[in-house]
Amino acid sequence: MQRKTSKRIPLFQQEGALKSYFPNSKITRNGDNEIRWTQMVKPTPLSGSYKLLLHYKRGRGAGVYVVSPKPLPLAKGKTRLPHVYNHKEQRLCLHYPKANEWDTSMYYVKSLIPWACEWLMHYEIWVGTGEWKGGGIEHDEDE
């Protein structure tokens, strides 16, 4: 199946959507080439709070990182976070690029940010049980 080419959402529109959904977030933008968004999130009413960074740079794509707490506590007996692109940077694996599950025609507030909150919910279950229930594809870091 061939994927249709979708129109990239300009970063000023992404910024507007981010401000609309998260008025207290911190956003910096470099024209239409780069944007950084930081915000505290609480994935469920029983969850802890996490500070996320979403960083998009044209030509490199988007990454979502947990910047606080850092390091994230691990499940008992585990030495690495599950389902991340980079353990040290705490860059979350939210989609598999080779499967084209995300592209620049998607709003961050409707894709990457809710996916990050879902990842955090599964992370909290993993810390308590030692089992990752969030699904996904096994891959090497920074793949």
Image (cartoon, helix red, strand yellow):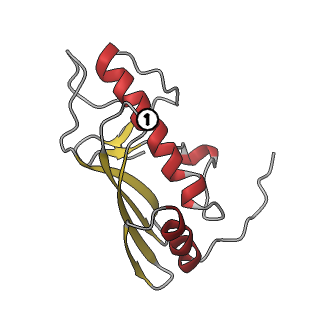
**Which percent across, then down, holds residue 7?**
71, 71
Residue pictured at 55% horizontal, 71% vertical: 14
Location of the C terminus (image quadrant): top left
In the rendered image of this protein, does residue 5 appear above or below residue 135?
below
Q: Nearer the viewer, residue 85 or 32?
A: 32
Up-down relation of residue 16 to residue 25 (above or below): below
Q: Disc 1 marks which amino acid? A: Thr
Kindly indicate the quadrant of the structure image that contains residue 76.
top left
Q: Residue at x 54, y 59 (%)?
A: 108
Percent from the top left, x then y, of residue 64? 40, 53
Residue named by callout 1: 44
Apparent side of residue 126 relative to residue 136 in the rendered image (left or right): left
Residue 3, position in %: x, y?
76, 54
Residue at position x 66%, y 64% in the image: 105
Taking the image as shown, residue 61 lies to the left or right of residue 74, namely: right
Camera-side residue: 40 or 112?
40
Q: Secondary structure at mark 1?
A: loop
Q: Furthest-front residue in view?
A: 45
Q: Nearer the viewer, residue 143 or 39?
A: 39
Q: Is residue 29 above or below residue 122?
A: below
* Residue at x 63% of width, y 60% of height: 106
For disc 1, the neighbor class at 10 Å (few under 14, some 14 to 19, many from 20) is: few
